[in-house]
Image: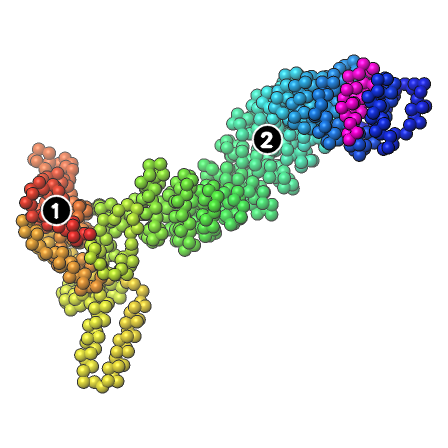
Amino acid sequence: MGKKQKKEVEPTPKDAQFNSLVIESRNVHTVVLMLDSLEDEILLKACEAIYKFAEKGDENKISLLALGAIPRLAKLIPHEDKQIHMYATMAFGVMATNSEVRKSMRQLNFLPSIIACLAPDDDVVVHELATLCLASMSIDFTSKVEIYEKGGMEPLIQLLSSTDPDVQKNSIECISNLVKDYVCRAALNGMNGIFPVLNLLNSEYPVIQQLALQTLITISTDVESRKALCQNDGHESLLQVLETPEFSDLHADTLHVLANCLEESQNVAIIRETGALEKLLVLVATSTFPEAQRHATNAITKSARNSEIRRIFHQHGLEKVLVMLLGINNDATRIAACEAVAVMSEDEASKETFRTEGGIDHLVPLLTSDNVEMKEAAALALANLTTANSSNARAVFVAEGVEPLVKLLTEPIDGIVVNAAATITNLALQEPIRASIQNYGTMTAITEPLKSSNTLVQSKAALVVASLACDANGRTELRNAGGLEPLVELLHSNNEEVKRNACWAILVCAKDEPTAAELCKLGVLEILDEVNLSSSRKNNFSEAAVKRLLDHNIALKYALTGYLSSKDIITDGFYDPGRIKPGMKVLTLEEFSNQELNQHRPILLINAKRTDGQSAGLSIDDKLTEALSAGSNRYSSSKSYTKDKSSSKSKSRGKKEEEKLKEEQLQLKTEEEEKNKPWECPYDVLFDAYISEVTRNILPLASTKEQIVALATFVSDKMGGPVSKEKLHEFTWELHIADVKFELKSNIIPIGKIEKGIYYHRALLFKALADRIGISCSLVRGNYTRAWNEVHLVDQPPQDIIGLFVPPTTYILDLMHQVGNLMKVDSPDAAHYETYTSCKLATCKCCKQLSWYLDHFEK
């Protein structure tokens, strides 16, 4: 904008004398003092000279400030002489452009005088410099409020229609600053100031147009102002700017205003009814200015967060426009388009359109971009497109999107990992795609995200594990990659979503025994037990995960719950460490074997499997012979060493000392090799023989009841036979157990080594043998030494209901006293068998015996 000719003051007869006074730095003080004169002529000359002096630069303004010119000029602004008033205002306006001067001005109450200069009857030059002063003062927040409170908004709005471009420019600049305060934004709308601002878009001066657009951008953040904009046909004015190629430098800001307007569904409806929406979309698609397209797309993204607006956009084919923008060779535009796709994909109809229009084919290549923001935005778009949409998931797979998505899991940017993980989870819901995902090493790649400190990354990573661990290959890869440990650590998270997803992943991982065993070694059961003890922390997945883990480790299940159902089959390697309190760590059998011999309850072992295969194919007689000859040396290496050493000494009698020394050295070497051998579960040759015997003699019996009674008798015979209740205290099973432990030098006792067994020994042996020959029974742990088996039998129905379904009856099997006796679960005999506390007789020897056991042995 060119410099306009300023209105000159008419010369006075004494001008020549004043002009002879050259205003130099040494004379400025004199001129400032002249502002205190009582003569109008002197005041006029001084104001004019100060205006011209201040206009030359900031140094002169600072000099005038230091000499006290500001308060003197402020007093002259409302002067009755129009020329003094004019030059005082002009000087004040020029001085206000300096920040240091403004600080001093704020101490003065001059704004009412400056605002008064905006009156319509005042000179245009006064308007120009007064608005310049207000524009400069409005930069500071405190002055914004004061200008508004002193009534400056309304005259400024009126001056927007001034014929002088400088007045327009200063007025709109001041208003642009004022509306940054929400009170002023509301006031502008209330004073019908939006329409005059819109008219400035037609100005021939770009600076005025830009200031008008900046004002519109600010006020359009207010709901009521946005509505007023469209009601005043503001969108038409904005579209005219967009349709004018000469205004290309204004397109970005214009689209910004439209973006804010589109956030109101009411405005979208207005724009749609006038046909302007189609124009907008065409302009976005065909514009040759990427910056404008980016702002337009951002506008669409903002407004599309409203479901009603998304529906309108879909009806007008916005998806096609966004797909076109994805193909533009401009990163900023494509990123904006990806974000718009992500928002529009919240509607199912848009998801389908994006696929059919080739949107997925455009998005997948962006995953390999060098631009980090591009990869994050593209992954987000694909995540939303594939959510609950199997067709889009298949389209990503066909477009070869799996490999780049898996690679994104190793990116250091959390947003990229989150979006890639979400997309992979969506794709993994389909089995053919899931296999392909696993082939790219996804479980290995997800290990690091599981260790992230970002809870959103942790949550999405756990979901990836949950979606892929349903296949054995996925579980194996995760286990080998070391992913189970960080997954278990997520159970400690304070974030409920992270904890829930981690429980879900563990539930899926625990489908197979190796993974479940590894999880148990990491203490997952103890952590889950602690979680489930809290009503606020537990969830459905945490409870289901515990059940799944225990189903794969029935030894732990029995230790923690005290119950094994007929579906829980005891296999080789099962051990019973006794009752374990919730939250306590359950040691493995190997860890138990490494403990020093103690006086606590022994660990009972079920194992008929030999690692060296020496017993394979042996008959029952052969196994019994081996058992009798081997004795206990199979279970105690230290004892076998002693025997071997003793035998060696016996054989070496009469030999030379040299041969004796060699043999001892060989023995030591053998012991060292044995010591370094990996731990193996002790083989129970007697239990192996029991299995062969019951398979040969009991399995062929005609009825289940006969098998149960026969097996009960067999177990009782092996465990010391029937013992009456009155003589239970004479049954010295505790001493026998202590002797076996001492003999084996171990806290672990194979079940076959027990010749005097109490309730829980017999119940365990019965369950272990019953499972081998297909007898369905459960194992229940009672208090202290009590344990029993429950079996289900169908009683003979009465003649009148023959042919109808009769539910089976549950019985408790007596293995201790009246061996083979079947007691209904709700009978008094069953109650006394289950727990001694049901006996009310103070002289009951059975109960006294159990009390002694509680006080001594179990401690």
Amino acid residing under circle 1? Leu
Query: What residue is shown with label 1?
Result: 813
Query: What residue is shown with label 2?
Result: 300
**Residue nearer the viewer, 327 or 829:** 829
Horizontal and vertical percent for residue 716? 10, 54
Q: Is residue 57 above or below residue 684?
A: above
Horizontal and vertical percent for residue 306? 53, 27
> Is any part of residue 373 visible from this angle?
yes
Name the residue at the bottom extreme.
656
Q: Which residues are magenta?
A: 65-92
Left or right, 742 with respect to 523, comes to: left
Helix, strand or loop at mark 1 = strand
**Residue at x-position 28% and y-position 62%:** 680
Indicate yes or no whether the magenta region holds residue 80.
Answer: yes
**Residue at x-position 67% and y-position 32%:** 252
Q: Quadrant of residue 533?
A: top left
Horizontal and vertical percent for residue 52? 84, 27
**Residue at x-position 87% and y-position 30%:** 27
Amino acid residing under circle 2? Ile
Horizontal and vertical percent for residue 280? 64, 28
Cα separation, mark 1 vs mark 2, equals 75 Å
**Quadrant of the rendering where the N terminus is positioned:** top right
Helix, strand or loop at mark 2 = helix
Q: Nearer the viewer, mark 1 or mark 2?
A: 1
Mark with earlier residue (1, 2): 2
* Neighbour tally class for label 2: few under 14, some 14-19, many 20 plus, Cα within 10 Å: many
**Residue nearer the viewer, 476 or 195:** 195
* Number of disc labels: 2
> Is any part of residue 399 visible from this angle?
no
